[in-house]
Image (spheres, rainbow, N blue to C red):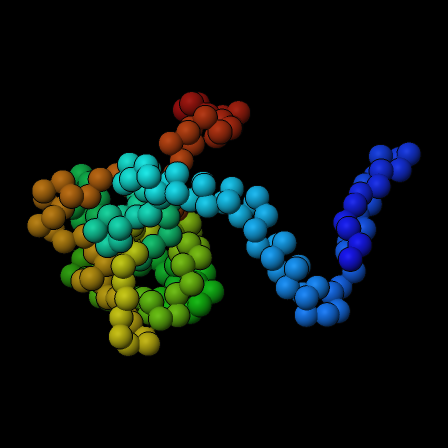
């Protein structure tokens, strides 16, 4: 059975000539034996046992759900409706931009005129069965009312799962306990936004 060898030409390229395919059963057995007991096999086993000997201190596995990986602030997960930090009122003004820009057509807003004649939100619904979490609704919102939270465990036995205003809006009890902080996640203004804003020539004039 011809042996495998390499040949380097004048250009520096290395050409490999492989052994011919085995024909007899003995040649097949010899090839299997040669590939099975090479030094690479024992090298791999040495690395595996060395990692096992280090114990839990060198464990690369997260014991989910007991342990959870930290999520970045700009992770696009289940939506939330925020309140104003000063007054606790709802930030959503019912402009409908998120409903218009939604590519999945999964957002529905119902508005009405309150006793002062101003637009108010009656219901805000999202069909999470159709939502693709693209983040366009959070980007287009002028009041930073709808954002992507960090809640990703939102499995359901139903194919179509709806989230309504009462589910998305920050509860007033939690809001009073300072549970809602200034949002810095997806769709929010960057911390360094002022650095990149170019002032107009009339900035500061009366």
Residue at left offset 63%, top offset 54% = 34
Q: In this view, does 82 lie above or below 163?
A: above
Q: Report which quarter residue 180 is drawn in.
A: top left
Q: Is residue 40 above or below residue 28?
A: above
Residue at left offset 39%, top offset 38% = 50
| Relative depth, front residue between 199 and 10 | 10
Left or right: residue 186 compared with residue 24: left
Residue 58 at x, y percent in the picture:
33, 38
Residue 16 at x, y percent in the picture:
79, 48
How many callouts does the rendering have? Answer: 0
Residue at left offset 27%, top offset 40% = 56
In the picture, the quarter occupied by the N terminus is: bottom right
Left or right: residue 147 compared with residue 200: left
| Relative depth, front residue between 116 and 134 | 134
| Relative depth, front residue between 102 and 15 | 15
Q: Which residue lies furthest to the right in this view?
A: 10
In the picture, the quarter occupied by the C terminus is: top left
Q: Report which quarter residue 158 is drawn in.
A: bottom left
| Relative depth, front residue between 177 and 19 | 19
Residue 162 at x, y percent in the picture:
28, 70
Q: Residue furthest front?
A: 26
Residue at left offset 11%, top offset 51% = 172
Q: Is residue 169 visible?
A: yes
Q: Can residue 118 be seen in this view?
A: no
Q: In this view, does 124 lie above or below 185?
A: below
């Amino acid at each position: 059975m011809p042996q495998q060898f390499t040949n380097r030409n004048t250009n520096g390229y290395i050409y490999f000539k492989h052994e011919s395919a085995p024909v007899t059963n003995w040649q097949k057995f010899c090839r299997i034996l040669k590939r099975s007991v090479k030094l690479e096999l024992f090298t791999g086993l040495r690395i595996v046992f060395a990692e096992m000997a280090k114990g839990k201190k060198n464990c690369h596995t997260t014991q989910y759900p007991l342990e959870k990986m930290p999520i970045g602030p700009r992770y696009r997960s289940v939506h939330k409706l925020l309140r104003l930090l000063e007054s606790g009122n709802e930030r959503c003004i019912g402009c409908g931009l998120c409903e218009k820009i939604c590519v999945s057509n999964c957002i529905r807003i119902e508005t009405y005129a309150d006793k002062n004649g101003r637009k108010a939100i009656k219901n805000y619904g999202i069909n999470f069965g159709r939502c693709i979490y693209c983040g366009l609704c959070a980007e287009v919102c002028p009041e930073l009312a709808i954002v992507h939270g960090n809640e990703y465990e939102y499995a359901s036995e139903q194919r179509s799962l709806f989230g309504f205003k009462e589910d998305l809006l920050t509860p007033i009890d939690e809001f009073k306990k300072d549970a809602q902080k200034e949002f810095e996640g997806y769709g929010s203004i960057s911390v360094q936004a002022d650095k990149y804003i170019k002032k107009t020539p009339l900035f500061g004039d009366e």
